Amino acid sequence: MTIEFDAAVFRAPNQPLTVEKVTIPSTPPPGEVLVRLRASGVCHSDLHVLRGEWEAPAPMILGHEGAGVVESVGEGVTTLKKGDHVVLSWTPSCRRCRYCTSGRPVLCDMVSEHSANHLSFDGRSRITSADKADVYSFAGLGTFGEYTLVPESGAIAIRNDAPFPQSALVGCAVTTGVGAAVNTAGVRPSDTVLVIGCGGVGLNAIQGARLAGARRIIAADISDDRLEQARLFGATDLVDSGQEDFADRVRRLTDGRGVEIAIEAVGLPRTIESAYEVLARGGTAVVAGQVADGVKISVDPFVMSDQELSLIGSNYGSSKPASDFPLLVDHYMNQRLDLDSLVTSEIGLQDVNEAFDRMKRGIGIRSVITY
């Protein structure tokens, strides 16, 4: 038996997504769960695929930032049941490889082998098009459709009183940003933190630095609107990097010292290099922004060793989704994180291409598809 539903399908780069009928098995395979989506964020990573900046197979259902309700569970599933409210993780873990057992599940061997190729753990697709062709699911999720099949570890149970649009953002932007500050950078109360780029990830990195008690949080962006949003999310100082000398301004704000932590949330070579260049001695630059395929950066290795600088990557906020997702939802429900302001528009699936147009123009923070 199968379920037919509408999904926004990627067919070719630089072409609008098409809303098409697709089908999915109604009975999950062993170890998997069928989730009925209730909300999906429209994320910049989806735009990378749409623009052809990331190589991706087609046809494919985009979307990887989702929340919904478990419809049914496959044989062997023990941690979820029908009716559970869940946030989806695009790094489902096998729970057995050396990365999972050492506490780094976002680097799981199975994720790099299958989910990164937009397939299930058995290397297959779960969805078919109207002409019976296999349809890939972006990051193994494909949340631009009402249903998805994911491994048990790819659906994280959360409290049932949390709203779906806000909870969906925990599946990517919130975890990536907050985690970059709290987990990857390990922000301390004595730190001055710089966040470059005040989109969904950057604003949440600001929230993460605030949660960690950073003494000062500097936000940099080229948009006055984004900078004002950054102030509302916890930035203490603002730098308009399109109107003033970025490095000079940061050094003046820190009495010439530089910052202990710089989090890059844009995904451009010049902003990654800028984050590294304004570090204080012993400082750390965290790359949380996603670049296009093939992009390279240049840093001075002598300065790196002489001043003991660190340049590190942050994948999914170095998170442990099974424990971090429920914690972040609790933070929101207890008013320690602002997720309401992140949701600047709720749309229907048919409006997804307009949402990408708004993203390209820098309008709003997150459009969320609701089902």
Image (cartoon, rainbow, N blue to C red):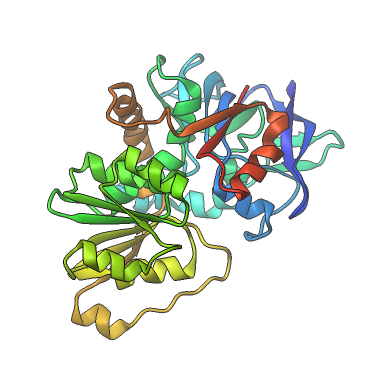
Residue 345 sits in which quadrant? top right
Percent across and percent down for residue 221 are 42, 55
What residue is drawn where x is 50% and y is 14%?
Answer: 83
Given residues 363 and 26, the one toward you in this image is 363
Percent across and percent down for residue 48 are 61, 54
Task: Judge whether residue 266 can be spotted in this image.
Answer: yes
What residue is drawn where x is 61% and y is 48%?
Answer: 361
Quadrant including the C terminus: top right
Given residues 275 and 111, the one toward you in this image is 275
In the image, taking residue 148 as reference, residue 262 lies left or right, namely left
In the image, taking residue 98 as reference, residue 46 lies left or right, namely right
Percent across and percent down for residue 1 are 74, 20
Outermost residue, bottom side: 302
Total numbered badges shown on the rendered structure? 0
Residue 255 sits in which quadrant? bottom left
Given residues 226 and 199, the one toward you in this image is 226
Given residues 324 and 79, the one toward you in this image is 324
Outermost residue, left side: 190
What residue is drawn where x is 42% and y is 79%?
Answer: 298
Percent across and percent down for residue 171 are 46, 36
Indicate whether 169 appears above or below 51. above
Indicate whether 271 appears above or below 181. below
Outermost residue, front side: 243
Task: Judge whether residue 102 can be spotted in this image.
Answer: no
Residue 160 sits in which quadrant? top left
What residue is drawn where x is 49% and y is 57%?
Answer: 290
